[in-house]
Amino acid sequence: MERIVLPDIKDLHLIDVYIQNGGYQAVKKAYAMSTDDVIAEVKKSGLRGRGGAAFATGLKWSFMPKTTDKPKYLCVNGDESEPGSFKDRQIFEFNPHQLLEGVLIACYAIQAKAAYIYIRGEYAKWVKLLQKALDDAYDKGFVGEKMKETLGSQFSCDIFIHKGAGAYICGEESALMNSIEGKRAYPRVKPPFPASNGLWGNPTTINNIETITNVPAIINKGAEWFSKIGEPKHPGTILCGVSGHVNKPGVYEIPTGTLLTDVIYKLAGGVPGDKKIKCVIPGGSSMPPLRGDQLEGVKMDADSLKAIGSGIGTAGVIVMDEDTNLVKVLARISKFYHHESCGQCTPCREGAGWLQKVLERIAAGNGVSSDLDLLISIASNIEGNTVCALGEAAAWPVRFMVTKFRQEFETYVKADVSIPVPNKVHSMRATEFPVADIKL
Ligand SMILES: Cc1cc2nc3c(=O)[nH]c(=O)nc-3n(C[C@H](O)[C@H](O)[C@H](O)COP(=O)(O)O)c2cc1C
Ligand code: SF4
């Protein structure tokens, strides 16, 4: 299989090697096209975002207003803080120039004069690597004012690297823009959407690192070529980060539609000790989990995973073997989302904390039988009632894990003790909530 995002070329991170292998040709080709034609090509390719929601990239670019005097911006999202997701850093390390070339093409298509690559603050090593690549691209005249001369174009743009502020919420697109603006990374209420009111109130497009890295290949080889790779409705390749109980954890570039079992057994070398799989989270910790007996025939693409009640997310595949204690796993996941809640809206701020408390109580052996319904009730009261999707990210693992592995959770709770579970918790103050009052 041809690798698009992480080609198997030695030292490709070096600008000279990248140029020797056809690098910075796609940007020349794109700049000779009209901006509408570039957007049409990306639309035709079927490229969908790799940042979680699998939204159509060309369509997103077409939302940018054409008749405006306001400056336009591109934000490229490399915050990568979802547990189980560690793919974008491979691009920073092994193919940064293809990312930069993609940024130059995207900026031209949407007529943005500046792009901000937002990179997870903890990625100190990768910030340095990316900065080196960007400095080299400036020196060779591929970025900034000099690109007019180098590429013989009327258009030029600048690229800035912005280090993240150490919080998962900074990856949410509107929180990311607040963070770049120097504000606290609170997600914004939408509408208005970034295409009209983004950075400093100006039209802005936000795309994931991997999404943008696909663009030079699409321009070079054509939309038709790209659209024939993998699943027709979600074409191309995806970087699949496999972790947990596998012999060869790592990032694998696969055509969309590859069987999940092939990813686990053929690429990641199967489960240590040939143990059975109890649970797999296919798209990063916020995606609903699959039971071990649900894996047969499951394909790695947005629509196939949606059809079986999960999601492609960031394609971070987390494998858990038969000996895994799912109560402890879920308690840990909930601790993460509670810690990362920005606190702006009540159902997420309070609910994520309640989920963590109840799960830790169950894990400690002090759970009661009604706790399982209580967890589902709390999760349902978070979902759909928050400013951003971190609410769902906190609620889904709990709702689906408890539902799909109910028996395992039941063995942990005391069957004879039960506390009434409220249907609606919105009107209750935290102090009135049963979680705080239970003494066993
Ligand atoms: C809590 C939260 C965290 C997110 N973190 C990231 C992230 O680290 N990287 C990313 O690309 N998208 C992340 N997203 C999704 C972005 O909001 C946005 O949809 C994405 O960057 C768009 O890029 P795409 O269209 O290329 O997929 C996150 C969303 C939420 C709700
Ligand atoms: S859902 Fe959570 S993270 Fe998102 S805005 Fe509300 S409190 Fe903040």
Image (cartoon, rainbow, N blue to C red):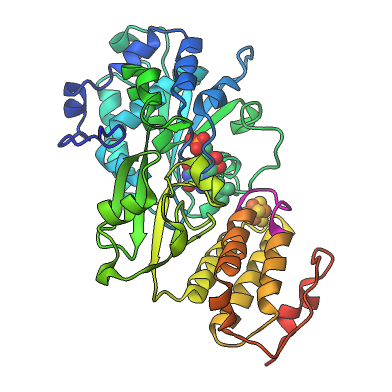
Expressed as whole percent of the image width and height from the top left, the position of residue 62 reads 57, 20
- What residue is drawn where x is 62% and y is 76%? 357
Between 402 and 47, the one lying in front of the other is 402
Expressed as whole percent of the image width and height from the top left, the position of residue 133 reads 27, 33
Between 362 and 73, the one lying in front of the other is 362
For residue 41: magenta?
no
Residue furthest to the right: 427
Q: In the image, is 274 to the left or to the right of 54?
A: left
Between 168 and 392, the one lying in front of the other is 392
Q: Magenta region: which residues? A: 382-390
| Quarter containing the N terminus | top left
Placement of 329 over or under 192, stated as above or below = below
Please identify the dominant SS of the magenta region: loop
Placement of 295 over or under 305, stated as above or below = below
Expressed as whole percent of the image width and height from the top left, the position of residue 244 reads 35, 64
Q: In the image, is 274 to the left or to the right of 360?
A: left
Between 335 and 239, the one lying in front of the other is 239
Placement of 293 over or under 222, stated as above or below = below
- What residue is drawn where x is 59% and y is 32%? 199
Residue furthest to the bottom: 440
Look at the image and tell me whether residue 401 can be seen: yes
Residue 95: image quadrant is: top left
